[in-house]
Image (tube, coloured by chain):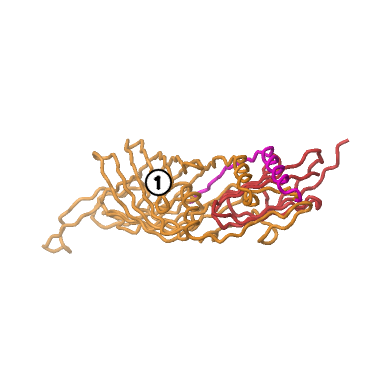
Chain colours: A orange, B red
Amino acid sequence: MQGLWRIPAAIILGGVLAHAVPIAGSDPPESPEQTLDSENKRAAYSGLIGSRMADPSLTSAIGPPGLGLQLTTDTKDRKARAKVGLRLGNDFFVDVKFIAPAGDADSEAEPIDLDGLRRSAVIDLGIHYLAWNPRLDAGRAKEIRDEYLARHPNSNKFVLSLNALKGEPDLRRRFLEAITWSTAVFAAVRAKVGRQDFTYADSSFESVSVQKTSAALEAAAGILVPVWGYFGISFEAQRFYEAGSSAELILPYRGGPAEQIKTLVLEPPGRRSRTRLQVEHRRTIGPFAAVNPRLSYFPKERAALVELPLYAFRNPEAGLNGGVNLSWISRNGGRFGLAVFIGSAFSLTPD
Amino acid sequence: MAAKKVRVVLKAKASSSFFRAYLDERRLRFEEGEEALDLEPKDLDYVLTWFIRDVPGTKYGIQVEEPERVRMTYAATLDASGKDAGIYWFKI
């Protein structure tokens, strides 16, 4: 899946360069072509990508572009999610998530989370910005080049690279030390629109169906620290509709003498608003697992939600493919929740 | 009298978001895969640096196409470390 959705239009060199070619007055730089075994790929994923941008549940505001499909389910709620992400130019990428509730939309079970759009079919568009400014100390690099030329008097190398220094481990280490990889900084805005069906009874107890549109705006920012993983913060404002309260009524059955008990919603859906502040962290635990702890606070409700999604790697090629989400919300004296999700393979690569 | 500027054409092929290239301290953006700069000749070297972090196996390349006397093409495939960086000195 890796690279499936890459858009190289912004950075194109004429033709695919399979090998470096000699340059005027210099040695040809090496370009080792390696076939990595699965163990190496797994290590690289967990160390490089998995600890950085993985968002397997497709619930975070900032995640790597690529293709993702997920089905999540718990005792009260099921959802299917799909995501398509594309890179735009040097610093921007966009993604679109399609979220469809697969459970009973009219369920009265109180959700563990407070997402006002949780029962809506949602289109969620995100625009991401990435700032990353690594630096190389050219003076130290020149010393390394001079050292290289001293060891290889016949060489006339004007290109130095990590790959090209593989045969000189000490110089490669010094070259690495001259590089400041720096922290990558992300920012994103997301717009969500959702549609949901509601059914209620009017004053003559006739059933009325309506479809309401909910919306949300989200702003998010995060940093990718090479050693520690990803740290993010987001703020979301939602305007959504909530079903009215229901009651059990005893009504005549088809106008006859018999009676039936019916549970009816007696008022149209009401419009609500909600805000949420969230902080999150993402990183891997060993080669086969990752965690994405999240702490959310809902000011209006004065409620806090703690989530601890645990993700499982199936293999490096398939990416993350399942997991569980443990959660706790401070409402009603505190309640715990457990969700399980499964999904198809998708790329974790921040294309 | 100012020296006549020299057109320097650089190209890159890198599909990763985590790819950056700089000429001295200037960020190269490679619109449509190419960036052309008019640079003044100077006694010191111009320094081209580049950085990439991505999945092992990712191919990328960077090239100085003009002027011909400093032409350079570099291409590599990321190894298990998932990263590469390089530097190229040239004088115009």
- Residue name at image x 71 percent, y 53 percent: B63
Q: Position of residue A197 (x, y in %)?
A: 34, 56
Residue at image mark 1: A292
Q: Nearer the viewer, residue A181 or A58?
A: A181
Q: Numbered disc 1: what chain?
A: A
Q: Position of residue A252 (x, y in %)?
A: 15, 59
> Is residue A147 rendered magenta in the image?
yes
Kindly identify the amino acid type of the residue bearing the numbered disc 1. Answer: Asn
Q: Position of residue A184 (x, y in %)?
A: 54, 42
Left or right of B77, for residue A72: left
Left or right of B13, for residue A197: left
Residue B32 visible in the picture: no
Classify residue A217 by image quadrant: top left
Q: Nearer the viewer, residue A167 or A86?
A: A167
- Residue name at image x 31 percent, y 45 percent: A327
Q: How many numbered marks does the figure carry?
A: 1
Left or right of A313, for residue B51: right
Classify residue B49 by image quadrant: top right
Q: Nearer the viewer, residue A343 or A227?
A: A227
- Whether residue A36 is situated above or below residue B31 in the rendered picture: below
Residue A343 visible in the picture: yes
- Residue name at image x 45 percent, y 46 percent: A61
- Whether residue A144 is situated above or below residue A107 in the rendered picture: above
- Residue name at image x 42 percent, y 56 percent: A320
Left or right of A213, for residue B37: right
Q: From which residue to which does the magenta span run? A: A125-154
Label 1's element? loop
Residue at the limit of the structure toward the right, as seen here: B1
Q: Residues within 10 Å of mark 1 (few under 14, many from 20)?
A: many
Q: Nearer the viewer, residue A262 or A196?
A: A196
